[in-house]
Amino acid sequence: MYRPGNKLLVWFLIFSFVFFLVAVIVEEFALFDSGEEVQPGDPSGGLYEQYAATNGPEAASGARFDGHPKLSGRPLRLVTTTWSPFAGAPGKPRFALDLVETALERMGIGADTVVMDEERLSSVLLSGAFDGSAAVWRNEARDSAMIYSRPYLENRLILVGRAGSDVSAASLAGLAGTKVALFAGLAYASVAETEDGPEFVRSNSDEYGVARLLDGEVDYALLDDLVVQYLIANHGDEARTRLVFGSTPLLTRSLHLAVNRTLPGADLIISGFEAEMRAMMADRTFHGLLELDWIRTDVDGDGLGEYVPYRDRTGPDPPSHFYELFLSDRPAMGPGMTRRYFLDGNVYEDWSAVPGRYKTPDAGRTGPDPRTTGSFSFTW
């Protein structure tokens, strides 16, 4: 017996089946892998998407900028390895990634970064799946394929011991017979393979390495100089009374932005990045991201080093502690020169030449430094 509702039901079932069939077809095409090689600058980014889905773009900007016309408004696809304190998971120190992403953003270029194992880094960069790396050291295997920026930071491993320990070792070989805590990040895997050196005890963080040192489980810890600077600046009393720091880095590696030579406009990206880095040192963006009060570098490009404060109102005394950006190629001192200071765009040849208005305390600075909130979690 015919009922009006039956016709509506039939059409509903037909429509539902067609909708389901179309959805299945669309999904199949979306998952289809064409097998084509992904070239730098190719917006399809198949291999990039695979790694990003597996590893997750670590603290990716998520922004899409149009400052570089060759990128068609998409971000640079970058890759690096876990490397404390330069590249890490969200919520952990990632000084190098912060610097690079900020410089690129100032150029109008976005950046998405994937973190992966070090042993796969070179092969992935050479495959063309990524545009480059935000934090990488020079490597013969990839030098021919990459254009490197000038160094923008140095990775310097400093020997740290309990108070009273001998930290005069000038090489890892001088630590034979000792136990040394080392962050388990794969960027330091080659360090742990050193022959005739200490026994390395892997730690899952810099904080845990220091805790094991203080508990007597290891004889020493190896920390990057930036971590040492943080300890002295933010845990000064504990750091000076319970720890002792070596003065000679046991390992030094320069950090670079590297982009694939075949990426359209690669030279312009590198030159623009270098210009932004110099500008960030002069306007103190660099200090803010690295959580440093004073750095020494050649900020004005004259070949001589200047001491640059995070704030122009520095207090009455010259800095007793500062961070030398580059020990391996430190800027020169002029004849008879002691210290040069760069404040508010001007260079002063010594502390006595610095105007008094800069030597007053910063009355507006109260409470903990917001730059250091959540960076590390050392306990004593």
Image (spheres, rainbow, N blue to C red):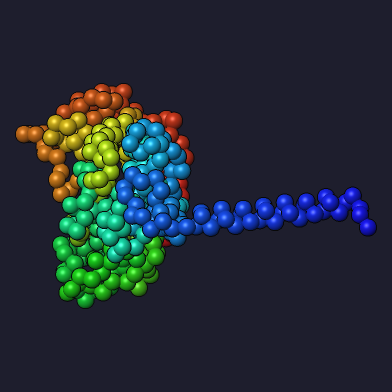
Place of residue 250 in the rendered image (x, y in percent of width and height, measured from the top left): 19, 60
Residue at (31% x, 23% y) in the render: 357
Q: Can residue 241 be seen in this snapshot?
A: no
Measuring from the top left, give residue 121's x and y in whole percent: 30, 59
Quarter residue 217 falls in: bottom left
Q: Is residue 166 left or right of residue 206?
A: left
Residue 230, above or below 360 = below
Figure quadrant of residue 299: top left
Image quadrant holding the C terminus, namely: bottom left
- Whole-percent x and y of residue 304? 14, 35
Please, which residue is most extreme toward the front here? 1
Which residue lies at the image location 63% right of the left edge and 56% below the top edge? 21
Q: Is residue 67 visible?
A: yes
The residue furthest right is 1
Q: Nearer the viewer, residue 298 or 293?
A: 298
Depth order, front residue of 365/58? 58
- Residue at image x 51%, y 54%? 30
**x, y percentage for residue 45?**
39, 50
Please determine whether, in this image, residue 233 is positioned above or below residue 319: below
Q: Residue at x 80, y 54 (%)?
A: 10
Horizontal side, residue 369 vs residue 176: left or right? right
Q: Is residue 351 above or below residue 52?
A: above
Residue sitting at the far bottom? 177
Count of marks, rendered view: 0
**In the depicted structure, whether residue 280 falls above or below residue 79:** above
| Quarter placement of the N terminus | bottom right
